[in-house]
């Protein structure tokens, strides 16, 4: 049986009282192509439902989306803070903290790298342009499948072993970023302007975040595809080793 990957949703369509939980289909396609079975995790209100999600899934994919509430990393909102999704913050933080505790594989994408870092005890830049005047263009106008800037991958990192490259061009759709890696994590990729593009845990089987959107780039791009394949492989190992006999091992 293929490992089950839970993909977090965001809130959309709130005008007129119609609230929807949704995710871009590209995440679903990337997981399916890499050998996983994707399911969507809605923004439930009951904490017991959130806990039940983790009994069902074998890996957690934190998808991209709107800004995080800076309350979660101890800051007041700055003028450039964008829209936040209160329910999403609550559910994703609960899921991520617990997933790290039980060593469930976690892949964070764009907003997801930020959620992963904050859940592990790190902080964010609310707006990278406010902290430096020499940043690259991190909100591209090119198609999502096209890499508009390069990232430098840390030699010897898990990310480098997956991508098989020390430099790779990626897409970019963000204005927030990891300020510094959370305890137990290291920065595994940066741009030439110093913005963090990758983090990874030094003590979990697979806890990696990337600031770019690999779900838009994996087709005809073997290094990017490898990121999802490695994530699914870790989820498969988790499924067979840590969930056997219905028991979870807590770190």
Image (spheres, rainbow, N blue to C red):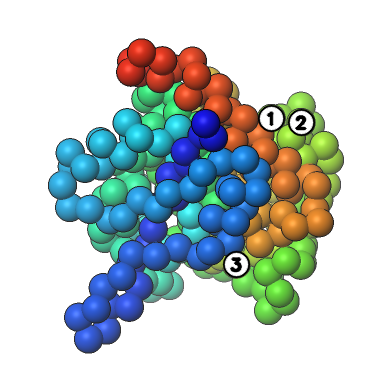
The secondary structure type at the circle numbered 1 is helix
Q: Position of residue 107 (x, y in %)?
A: 53, 41
Q: Earlier in the sequence, mark 3 or mark 2?
A: 2
Q: Position of residue 94 (x, y in %)?
A: 29, 41
Furthest toward the front, the residue is: 1
- Does 207 appear above or below 133? above
Number of marks: 3
Judge left or right: residue 176 versus residue 88: right
Q: Position of residue 141 (x, y in %)?
A: 68, 79
Q: Mark on residue 161?
A: 2
Separation (CA) of disc 3 from disc 2? 25 Å
Q: Are marks 1 and 2 in contact (CB under 8 Å)?
A: yes
Determine if residue 75 is in view.
no
Nearer the observer: mark 3 or 2; the answer is 2
- Does 130 appear above or below 214? below
Q: Mark on residue 158?
A: 1
Q: Are marks 3 and 2 in contact (CB under 8 Å)?
A: no
Q: Residue at x 40, y 71 (%)?
A: 82
Q: Earlier in the sequence, mark 3 or mark 1?
A: 1
Separation (CA) of disc 1 from disc 2? 5 Å
- Does 247 appear above or below 43? above
- Would you name the residue on which mark 3 appears? 173
Return the residue nearer the eye: 232 or 73.
Answer: 232
The secondary structure type at the circle numbered 3 is loop
Q: Residue at x 40, y 36 (%)?
A: 57
The secondary structure type at the circle numbered 2 is helix
């Amino acid at each position: 049986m293929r490992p089950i990957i839970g993909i977090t949703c965001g809130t959309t369509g709130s005008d007129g009282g119609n609230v929807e939980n949704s995710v871009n289909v590209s995440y679903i396609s990337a997981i399916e192509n890499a050998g996983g079975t994707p399911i969507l995790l809605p923004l439930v209100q009951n904490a017991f439902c959130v806990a039940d999600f983790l009994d069902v899934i074998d890996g957690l994919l934190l998808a991209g989306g709107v800004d995080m509430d800076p309350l979660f990393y101890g800051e007041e909102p700055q003028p450039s803070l964008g829209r936040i999704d209160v329910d999403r913050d609550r559910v994703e933080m609960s899921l991520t903290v617990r997933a790290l505790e039980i060593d469930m594989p976690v892949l964070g994408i764009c907003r997801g790298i930020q959620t992963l870092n904050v859940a592990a005890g790190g902080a964010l830049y609310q707006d990278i342009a406010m902290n430096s005047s020499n940043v690259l263009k991190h909100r591209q106008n090119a198609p999502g499948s096209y890499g508009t800037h390069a990232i430098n991958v840390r030699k010897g990192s898990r990310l480098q072993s997956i991508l098989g490259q020390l430099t790779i061009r990626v897409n970019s759709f963000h204005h927030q970023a990891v300020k510094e890696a959370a305890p137990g994590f290291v920065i595994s990729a940066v741009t030439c302007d110093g913005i963090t593009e990758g983090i990874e845990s030094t003590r979990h089987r697979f806890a990696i975040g990337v600031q770019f959107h690999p779900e838009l780039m994996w087709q005809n791009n073997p290094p990017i595809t490898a990121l999802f394949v490695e994530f699914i492989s870790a989820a498969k190992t988790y499924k067979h080793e840590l969930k056997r006999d219905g028991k979870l091992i807590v770190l």
